[in-house]
C-alpha cells in the first residue's frame, strides 16, 4: 500500500545522526523520516533502510583467540627471566627447582588468561540487554518483529513491561512511565509526554519525550518513532565507550615489572664479576661457571610471582567473607593505592528506594515532627487513596517507588491502604500525565463523594481556594506554602502536594478535567527522598581518615545530590557547589583537571562525562575507584583503576566491567576491602625485604670471599638449597601476617612510590652485608682454628640467619615480643620446619654426601646459632631506631587505634 499520508511528501530518508530529537516536533520528525505515524513504513522501505543503517544491534568486539591471549601472558620481562632461570636450573642438574619455576610461570599464565577472557564479557553482557522482540506498525499492520530488524522511521508500540527496542521520539502516550535506572542510574520512574522540550541542553534524565533503548516501560502505553538504532542509540554510545582500550597496569604490576628488570640486570652483572674474579684467582672455570649460574638462580626471586598470587588469592578469599567478590586478583592490592573513590549515588550511597522524609499539614510553619494530628492523618489518607500501589504476597508494595513510599508513610501512621481502599472504594479517576503533573481519584463516601488530588506543588496549589485545618476548610496562604515547597526542593526532596474536594455527584465527563480539579482544599506537602544507607556516612568518614577522597557522581538533580552529600559528610556546607553535566560540557580537559581536586559532587552527568572525570583525576596522578550499578556506570567502571559494582541491585554489564563486586551493595564494604588491600601490599613488601636481603647476603658472601683471600664458601648445591627452603614456605607464610596497627590511619601510598621506599633498599643492603660478614667471619674463624667443617658452618649460618631475619621483619615498626610469636602460626611453623630440614642435611648420614656437609659439634652449632641471632637483634635495633625517629603525632595516631 503506498505511503501517501500528507506528512510524507518527500522521499524516504532520515535526518543526520546526532539530531536533537527531543527538541524537535514529533510530526515534523515523522515527515523527515518519510513515514505516516498511522500507517508505518512499507516493507520495501524497511529493507532499503536496513541496508543503509545496518542491524539494530550493538557492535561485537573482535575477540582474540585463546592461543593469542595465552602467548601474551609470556611477554612480561620477569616471566622471561624466570623461564631462563628454569633452563639454567635444569642445566646444573636441579630439576626440582626447574619444575617449581615452570609451575609458577604456568600458574601466572593461567591466571592472566582467565583475566583476559573475563575482560571481554562486559560488551557481551551489554549486547544481551538489547530487546529481542518489538511491536511495530508496518504497512498499516501491527506485527511482532526481531528488535535487530528495526530501522529509523519505524513506528514502535510500547506497553507496560516492554523493553524499549531502540531510541524513540514519542508520538503518543497514555500514562506512560519508563524505568530508566539502567541508563541514568536514577530509581524514580519517569513520566513521559510527547510534547516539544524548551531550552537547549537537557540531560538524558530530562528528555521526557524520548524512550531509550534498553530501558523498560513500567506503566501505561505509548507509540514512538525510531530515531536511532544500534550504535547510534544512547545505549550504543555506552557500548562504544566500553569498547575503548582502557587497560591500565595496576600499581603492583608496575612495581613488580620495574623490580624484576632491575634485579635481573643487577644479578647478571654481579655474577659476571664473580666469574671473572674467581677465574683470575685461579679457581676452576667450570666450577666458577656453576657457582655464577647457581647464584643467578638463587638471587632472582622466582618465588615472588607465586607469593604475590597466593597473597592476592588469600586476600580475595578473605574478602568474600565480608561480601566483596574479587574478579581480578591484582585489584585486591590496587585498593591499597586508591586515593579517590568516585561513587554513584543511587543504590550505592543510598538505599535505592523512596522514603517520606517529612509530612507537613495544617500550617506552612509545620515542622513535620511529632505524632500526626487530624490534619496530618487526612493528608496521609489522601496519600494512601490517591495511589496505585498494591500489596505483594511478600508484604512489599507493587508500585512506582514514589507510590510505595506514600503507602509506607501512611501505614506507619496507622492507615492501612488495603482497609482504606475497602472503606473508600475508588469509583473514578483522572490519571496522571506529564502535562498536568497531577492525578485525581474519586471515592465513595458516607455522603456523596470525595476527590483526592496529588501532584507537583506548582500544579496543585494554584487550583486550591482553601486549606484544611482542624478538620475543616480554612483560608489558604498560597505564597507561604509555595515558598515552603521550594525550600524542601532546595534540600533535595521530591515534593508532592495533596488536596481534596467533596462532591455530591460524580463530575460529568463532558465537564472535563478542568472542572473536576478546581476549588480544591489544600491538605499539605510530603517530601520524599532516596535516603542514604545507614552505614554509608561511617564509611565516608573511614575513607577520609584513611586519606581517601570520596566523590559523588550522579545523574540526579543538583539539589538532591548536594543534600545527600551533606548528610553523608562528603561536603561540610549544605550550600556546597555542585558541578553539573552542563558545566562539564563547557570545560576543556585542562580546565577540568584544575577543578577536579576541589569538586566533591557532580550531578546530571552522562556516561562519557563520568569517564572524563576519572581521566582528569588519573592525569593528576590519582588512583581512582569508581562504584556503580547501572549500565551508565559501566564505561567509567572499566576506565577506573578499580571498578566496584553492586552484586544485588547492579546490572550484568556493570559487574562484567568491574574488578570488584559488592555482594551486599554496601559502600562500607569498600573500606574493609581497602584495609585488606593495604595489608596485602605490606606483606608483599615484607616478602621482598626478606627474599632480597637473603639473596643479597648470598651474593655478598660469594663476592667478598675471594677479595678477602678466602676460598669459595658455598657450593652450587648449597646455594640452591638455601634458595629453596628459605624462599619457599617461610616466604609464603608471610601472606598470613596480620595487618599493622594504624593501617587505616595512614594516607594511601603514592601510586608511583617505589617498592623499595621507606628505607627498604638500605635495609636489604645493610642486613645483607651483615649476614655476609657473619658468614665470612665464621668461615675465617673456623679455618684459622682448624675446623674442617667450615663450609657446613657457612651453609648453616646463611640458612638460619635468614630464619632469624624473617622473624624480625614481621612488622615494620613493632618489636617481635609485642606482636607475639604465635600471632602468625603458619610462619612460626615454616621457620621450625626449615630449621629441622637444615639440621637433617647436617646430621642425617644419608644426606651428607648429597649436600657435601659434615656433622657439626656442639660448639660449632652454637657459633652458628649465635651468628644467626645477631641478625635478629640488629633487625630489632633498626626498628627501635625508626620508632625513635617518628614524629610525636605519629605516636598519638598509633595509640588511638
Image (cartoon, helix red, strand yellow):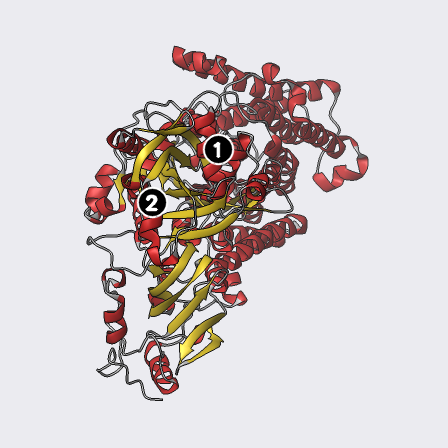
**Residue 222 horizontal side relative to residue 647, left or right:** left
Can residue 697 be seen from the camera position used here? no
Q: Residue furthest bottom?
A: 1
Q: Residue at x 38, y 49 (%)?
A: 636
- Residue at 68% x, 27% y: name it: 825
Left or right relative to 309: residue 769: left
Using the image, tell me which numbered label, if any, was put on residue 344. none
Residue 409 visible, this angle: yes
Count how many numbered circles sit on residues in the image. Answer: 2
Mark 1 Cα shell of 10 Å, populated few (<14), some (14-19), many (≥20): some
Q: Residue 99 in the image: state x and y as whole percent.
A: 65, 52
The residue tagged 1 is 533
Asked if the residue under mark 2 is in contact with the one under mark 1, i.e. CB atoms within 8 Å, the reply is: no
Percent position of residue 894, x then y: 47, 16
Residue at 44 percent of width and 28 percent of height: 376
Choose top left, top right, bottom left or bottom right for residue 628: top left
Q: Nearer the viewer, residue 882 or 587?
A: 587
**In front here: 486 or 257?**
486
Q: Crowding near pointer 2: few (<14 within 10 Å), some, many (20+)?
A: many
Q: Quadrant of residue 32?
A: bottom left
x and y, in percent, of residue 44 in the image: 37, 87
Quadrant location of the N terminus? Answer: bottom left
Q: Secondary structure at mark 2?
A: helix
Viewer-closest of 542 and 211: 211
The extreme right residue here reads: 845
Query: Observer-nearest residue: 710 or 761?
Result: 761
Instruction: Work out whether 886 lies above or below 684.
Output: above
Residue 614: mark: 2
Question: Helix or strand or loop: what does disc 1 sit on?
Answer: loop
Q: Nearer the viewer, mark 1 or mark 2?
A: 1
508 on left or right of 577:
right
Q: Position of residue 141 (x, y in %)?
A: 43, 81
Amino acid at each position: 500500500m503506498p505511503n501517501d499520508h500528507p506528512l510524507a511528501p518527500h522521499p524516504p530518508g532520515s535526518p543526520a545522526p546526532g539530531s536533537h530529537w527531543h527538541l524537535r516536533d514529533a510530526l515534523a520528525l515523522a515527515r523527515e523520516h518519510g513515514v505516516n505515524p498511522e500507517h508505518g513504513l512499507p516493507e520495501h522501505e524497511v529493507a532499503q533502510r536496513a541496508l543503509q543503517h545496518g542491524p539494530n544491534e550493538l557492535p561485537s568486539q573482535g575477540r582474540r583467540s585463546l592461543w593469542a591471549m595465552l602467548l601474551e601472558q609470556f611477554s612480561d620481562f620477569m616471566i622471561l627471566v624466570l623461564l631462563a632461570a628454569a633452563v639454567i636450573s635444569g642445566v646444573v642438574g636441579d630439576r626440582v627447582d626447574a619444575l617449581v619455576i615452570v609451575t609458577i610461570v604456568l600458574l601466572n599464565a593461567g591466571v592472566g588468561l582467565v583475566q583476559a577472557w573475563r575482560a571481554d564479557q562486559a560488551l557481551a553482557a551489554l549486547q544481551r540487554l538489547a530487546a529481542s522482540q518489538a511491536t511495530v506498525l508496518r504497512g498499516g499492520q501491527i506485527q511482532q518483529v526481531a528488535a535487530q530488524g528495526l530501522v529509523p522511521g519505524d513506528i514502535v508500540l510500547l506497553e507496560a513491561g516492554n523493553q524499549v527496542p531502540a531510541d524513540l521520539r514519542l508520538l503518543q502516550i497514555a500514562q506512560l512511565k519508563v524505568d530508566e535506572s539502567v541508563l541514568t542510574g536514577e530509581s524514580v520512574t519517569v513520566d513521559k509526554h510527547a510534547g516539544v522540550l524548551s531550552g537547549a541542553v537537557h540531560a538524558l534524565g530530562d528528555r521526557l519525550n524520548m524512550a531509550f533503548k534498553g530501558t523498560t516501560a513500567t506503566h501505561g502505553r505509548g507509540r514512538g518513532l525510531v530515531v536511532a538504532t544500534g550504535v547510534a542509540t544512547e545505549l550504543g554510545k555506552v557500548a562504544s565507550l566500553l569498547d575503548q582500550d582502557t587497560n591500565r597496569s595496576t600499581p603492583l604490576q608496575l612495581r613488580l615489572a620495574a623490580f624484576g628488570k632491575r634485579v635481573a640486570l643487577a644479578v647478571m652483572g654481579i655474577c659476571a664479576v664473580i666469574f671473572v674474579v674467581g677465574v683470575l684467582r685461579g679457581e676452576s672455570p667450570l666450577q666458577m661457571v656453576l657457582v655464577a649460574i647457581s647464584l643467578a638462580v638463587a638471587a632472582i626471586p622466582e618465588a615472588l610471582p607465586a607469593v604475590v598470587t597466593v597473597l592476592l588469592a588469600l586476600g580475595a578469599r578473605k574478602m568474600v567473607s565480608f561480601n566483596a567478590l574479587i574478579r581480578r586478583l591484582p585489584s585486591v592490592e590496587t585498593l591499597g593505592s586508591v586515593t579517590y573513590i568516585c561513587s554513584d549515588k543511587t543504590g550505592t550511597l543510598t538505599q535505592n528506594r523512596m522514603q517520606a522524609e517529612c509530612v507537613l499539614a495544617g500550617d506552612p510553619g509545620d515542622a513535620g515532627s511529632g505524632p500526626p494530628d487530624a490534619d496530618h492523618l487526612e493528608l496521609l489518607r489522601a496519600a494512601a487513596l490517591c495511589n496505585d500501589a498494591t500489596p505483594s504476597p511478600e508484604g512489599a508494595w507493587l508500585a512506582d517507588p514514589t507510590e510505595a513510599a506514600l503507602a509506607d508513610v501512611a501505614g506507619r501512621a496507622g492507615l492501612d491502604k488495603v482497609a482504606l481502599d475497602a472503606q473508600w472504594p475508588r469509583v473514578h479517576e483522572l490519571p496522571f500525565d506529564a502535562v498536568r503533573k497531577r492525578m485525581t481519584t474519586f471515592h465513595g463516601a458516607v455522603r456523596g463523594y470525595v476527590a483526592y488530588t496529588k501532584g507537583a506543588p506548582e500544579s496543585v496549589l494554584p487550583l486550591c481556594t482553601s486549606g484544611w485545618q482542624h478538620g475543616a476548610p480554612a483560608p489558604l496562604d498560597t505564597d507561604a506554602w509555595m515558598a515552603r515547597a521550594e525550600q524542601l526542593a532546595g534540600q533535595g526532596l521530591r515534593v508532592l502536594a495533596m488536596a481534596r474536594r467533596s462532591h455530591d455527584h460524580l463530575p460529568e465527563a463532558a465537564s472535563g478535567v478542568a472542572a473536576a480539579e478546581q476549588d480544591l482544599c489544600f491538605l499539605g506537602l510530603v517530601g520524599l527522598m532516596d535516603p542514604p544507607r545507614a552505614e554509608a556516612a561511617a564509611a565516608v568518614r573511614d575513607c577520609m581518615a584513611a586519606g581517601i577522597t570520596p566523590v559523588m557522581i550522579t545523574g540526579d538533580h543538583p539539589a538532591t545530590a548536594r543534600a545527600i552529600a551533606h548528610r553523608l559528610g562528603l561536603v561540610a556546607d549544605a550550600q556546597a557547589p555542585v558541578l553539573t553535566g552542563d558545566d562539564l560540557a563547557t570545560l576543556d580537559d585542562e580546565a577540568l583537571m584544575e577543578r577536579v581536586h576541589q569538586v566533591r559532587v557532580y550531578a546530571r552527568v552522562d556516561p562519557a562525562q563520568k569517564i572524563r572525570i576519572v581521566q582528569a583525576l588519573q592525569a593528576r596522578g590519582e588512583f581512582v575507584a569508581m562504584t556503580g550499578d547501572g549500565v551508565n556506570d559501566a564505561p567509567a567502571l572499566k576506565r577506573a583503576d578499580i571498578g566496584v559494582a553492586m552484586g544485588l541491585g547492579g546490572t550484568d554489564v556493570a559487574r562484567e566491567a568491574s574488578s570488584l563486586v559488592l555482594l551486599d551493595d554496601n559502600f562500607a564494604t569498600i573500606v574493609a576491602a581497602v584495609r585488606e588491600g593495604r595489608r596485602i601490599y605490606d606483606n608483599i613488601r615484607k616478602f621482598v625485604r626478606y627474599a632480597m636481603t637473603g639473596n643479597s647476603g648470598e651474593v655478598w658472601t660469594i663476592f667478598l670471599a675471594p677479595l678477602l683471600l678466602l676460598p669459595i664458601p658455598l657450593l652450587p648445591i648449597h646455594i640452591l638449597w638455601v634458595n629453596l627452603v628459605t624462599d619457599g614456605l617461610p616466604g609464603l607464610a608471610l601472606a598470613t601476617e596480620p595487618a599493622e596497627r594504624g593501617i587505616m590511619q595512614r594516607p594511601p601510598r603514592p601510586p608511583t612510590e617505589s617498592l623499595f621506599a621507606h628505607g627498604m633498599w638500605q635495609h636489604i643492603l645493610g642486613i645483607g652485608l651483615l649476614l655476609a660478614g657473619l658468614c665470612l667471619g665464621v668461615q675465617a674463624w673456623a679455618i684459622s682454628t682448624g675446623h674442617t667443617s667450615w663450609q657446613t658452618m657457612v651453609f648453616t649460618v646463611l640458612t638460619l640467619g635468614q630464619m632469624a631475619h624473617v622473624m624480625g621483619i614481621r612488622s615494620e615498626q613493632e618489636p617481635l615480643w609485642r606482636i607475639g610469636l604465635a600471632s602468625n602460626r603458619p610462619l612460626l611453623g615454616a621457620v621450625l620446619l626449615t630449621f629441622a630440614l637444615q639440621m637433617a642435611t647436617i646430621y642425617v648420614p644419608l644426606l651428607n654426601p648429597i649436600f657435601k656437609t659434615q656433622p657439626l659439634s656442639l660448639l660449632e652449632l652454637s657459633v652458628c646459632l649465635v651468628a644467626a641471632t645477631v641478625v635478629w637483634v640488629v633487625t630489632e635495633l633498626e626498628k627501635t631506631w625508626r620508632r625513635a625517629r617518628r614524629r610525636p603525632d605519629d605516636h598519638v595516631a598509633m595509640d588511638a587505634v
